[in-house]
Image (tube, rainbow, N blue to C red):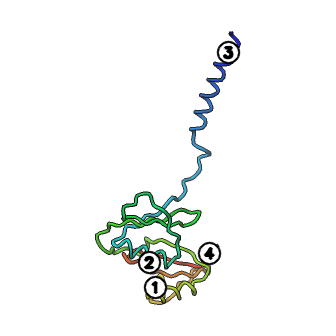
Amino acid sequence: MKLLTLILVFAMTLHSFQDSKAQAPKNNAPAVLNHIAVYVTDLEKSTDFYKHTFEFKQIPEPFHDGRHTWFSLGAIGQLHLIKGAKGKGNFDKNEHLCFSVASIDAFIEKLKAQNVAYEDWAGAAQSITLRVDGIKQIYFQDPDGHWLEVNDDHK
């Protein structure tokens, strides 16, 4: 009987130790990007813009309230569009989202077909910035004035 009690106490202690160990943080891993939220005035217009300009895959969103569109950004996370902005913003170009493509020239053709104006970092229309590391980049705005960068640093 004492042996059974001893085994039972040992098992309970081991179980408690494993529970506390399972709740401890793992390896102090850094945080990872989950999603980027962009506040928009016209959800349908912005959804169409991001879907067709970047060819993002739309994914289910849990709210089903007509105020959200979610896109997959692959392994890095998601882009969430949220309806409710009161008007087009006056955003600084330094605050922008950046996406990489295999070919800047092919992407520019897509922008031209959609009548989306683009510029280089300095603001010269229909121009491309060539970074010191050889990466080409352009800048343009979404329907609400959020700045976007596209470059050819596609890995």
Tell me the distance, in whole angstroms, between the alpha carbons under discs 3 and 4: 62 Å
Q: Which residue is mark 1?
A: 118
The amino acid at mark 3 is Leu
- Of mark 4 and mark 1, the one earlier in the sequence is 1
Q: Secondary structure at mark 2?
A: helix
CA gap between label 2 and label 4 equals 21 Å
Q: How dense is the environment of label 4, judged by Cα within 10 Å: few (below 14), some, or many (20 and up)?
A: few
For marks 1 and 2, the one nearer the N-term is 2
Q: Earlier in the sequence, mark 3 or mark 4?
A: 3
Residue at 49% from the left image edge and 77% from the top image edge:
149
Locate residue 101: give its quadrant: bottom right
The vertical placement of 62 against 131, above or below, is: above
Instruction: Give the CA separation, mark 1 to mark 2.
Output: 14 Å
From the viewer's side, name the closer residue of 77 and 155: 77
The residue singled out by tag 4 in the image is: 154
Q: CA–CA distance between discs 2 and 3?
A: 68 Å
Residue under label 3? 6
Estimate how packed mark 1 is, as few (under 14), some (14 to 19) or many (20 or more) residues with alpha carbons within 10 Å: many
Q: Secondary structure at mark 1?
A: loop
Residue extending farthest to the front is: 64
Q: In the image, which is nearer the foreground, mark 3 or mark 4? A: 3
Residue closest to the eye, 44 or 53? 44
Residue at 57% x, 39% y is: 24
The kind of residue tagged 4 is: His
Q: In the image as oriented, which residue stretches furthest toward the right?
A: 3
Q: Position of residue 143 (x, y in %)?
A: 38, 78
Q: Amino acid at mark 1?
A: Tyr
Q: Is residue 113 above or below residue 60?
A: below
Q: Which circle marks residue 49 in the picture?
A: 2
The image shows residue 62 at horizontal and vertical percentages of: 44, 57
Q: x and y percent of residue 35 in the render?
A: 49, 61
